[in-house]
Structures are given as structure tokens and as C-alpha cells.
Amino acid sequence: MTVNKIPEKNSLLFVWLNNYAGVLLKTPSKTLLIDPVDIKVRSFPQVDAILITHEHYDHLDQRLIAELQKTTGCTVIADATSAKSLRNNIPSEKLKEIQVGETTKIGDVTIKAEKCKHPAASPVTFIITSEDGVKVWHTADSLPYSEMATIGQKEQLDMVFCTVGIAPGTSPETGSEIAWLTKPKIAVPYHSSSVASQKKFAEILRKELPKTACLIPEVNKIYQISKGEKKT
Ligand SMILES: [Zn+2]
């Protein structure tokens, strides 16, 4: 699937790419791929950066990343453990290791690494701010943790991806707790192959967090979200 569409100003496009945390984000100027696995290289001819949250097989596919990097010339931003395992396949000037608390830029798009509560070696989550201020938190496979509330309040997030399954300890309940802590305008249940889990997440949100819209994504479908968008 090739995304030719360009988002309008103050908007971005996203596509959920697999049953895990694979997400394509497209701002008016940049295209980012987060944790790409189970995708075809030829479907992504234009990528500016690949972001990797941790080394688990459903997030890090060294061979795929090397191929994508070669065909697009993109930068790869990865947690320390993943960066180490990519070192032999990605040119050093294109590989950037990121630690919790660090910020980096791809053109005018800002990427900040935050904590990830998940049993991996050095996992991170990413807060991405587009050039016109649309903010997305890709929480990887994280379980909820208390500082998420402070981060949510500070960042005023437009959209948060919330894991609802597969990863250890995660469920629609833990996913909706992430939404509850971060209070985004839009919460997206992902990292699951069960629509029932996503629906359960939506149901909890309707009761506990009526001001947050729930967007249940379909794999490979393009969604556009805008800054300040609220549930109507
Ligand atoms: Zn995972």
C-alpha cells in the first residue's frame, strides 16, 4: 500500500500496518515508519525516518529495516539495544540511538523518547510532534505508568496509540488506562488481532472518558486526524 495522499495543514495521516505497533505517520513534510514488520518494502518508496521502540521480533526486523533504508535513504532512530543490532546493516551516519528523555528532529518534525513499561532491554515510546504542532504518542507495548498523566497534561496530545493485547500483561483495561492517564483527543487501540478487544477498549472509554474519541483502526486503511479535533 502506497500513501500518495498528503495531509492538509494542521493534520496528519496515519496507517496501522500490522497487528502490532507498526504505524505509518505522514505529516505535510515527512513520512515516518514506526516498528515496521510484516510489510512490503516496495509499498514504501518514500520514507524519511524509521523509528524502533524495542528489539522484540514484532517490532524489529533487521533485514526489512536494512532494505527500507537502502531503498529510501532514510534515517533510523532506535532504542539502544535495537540500534546495536542494526549497526552492521545501516550506515553509521543514518543510524541514531535514542534514550528516554532525548529529543531529535527530522526536518521540522520533533521526536521525543519517553519511558516504556514493557519487559524489553531498553524500550522507548515516541512522542511525535508534526511541523504544525499535531502531537501523537506512540506508546509501543507499554503498560500504563503514573508519569503518563504528567506527560499527557504537558503535551496536550491529539492522539495516543494504546496497546490492548498480545504484549505481557496488556489488555483492553490497561490500554484504556493509558488513555485515561494521557487524556488525548483521540485514542487508538492497537497491538491486537482481536476486534473484540478493541471494541472492549472503546466501551470502557465511552464510560470513563467521554471526551476522548476512540478510533478503532483497520489495518492498511488511511486515516487523517487534525489538531484540536474533538469528538462531536
Ligand atoms: Zn509487541
Image (cartoon, rainbow, N blue to C red):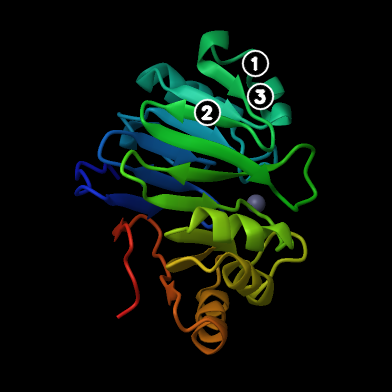
Neighbours of disc 2 within 10 Å: few (<14), some (14-19), many (20+): some
The residue at 55%/55% (across/down) is 154
Mark 3 vs mark 2: in front = 2
Q: Nearer the viewer, residue 7 or 89?
A: 7
**Foreground: disc 2 or disc 1:** 2
| Mark-to-mark CA distance, 2 and 1 | 19 Å
Q: In the rendered structure, which disc, 3 or 2, sits on the residue that comes first in sequence? A: 3
Determine the secondary structure under disc 3.
Answer: helix
Specify whether 222 is left or right of 34: left
Q: What is the spatial separation of the Cα atoms under label 3 and label 2, in whole angstroms? A: 15 Å
Mark 3 vs 1: CB contact within 8 A: yes
- Residue 199 visible from this viewpoint: yes
Which of the 4 image quarters holds residue 3?
A: top left
Vertical placement of residue 195 versus 146, above or below: below
Q: Residue furthest front?
A: 154
Q: Is residue 1 left or right of residue 212?
A: left
- Residue type, mark 2 in image: Thr
Q: Secondary structure at mark 1?
A: loop
- In the rendered image, residue 224, in percent from the top left (x then y), is placed at 28, 57
Which of these two is toward me, 190 or 194?
A: 190
Where is the N terminus found, in terms of image quarters?
A: top left
Residue beneath disc 1: 87
What residue did someone put label 2 on?
104
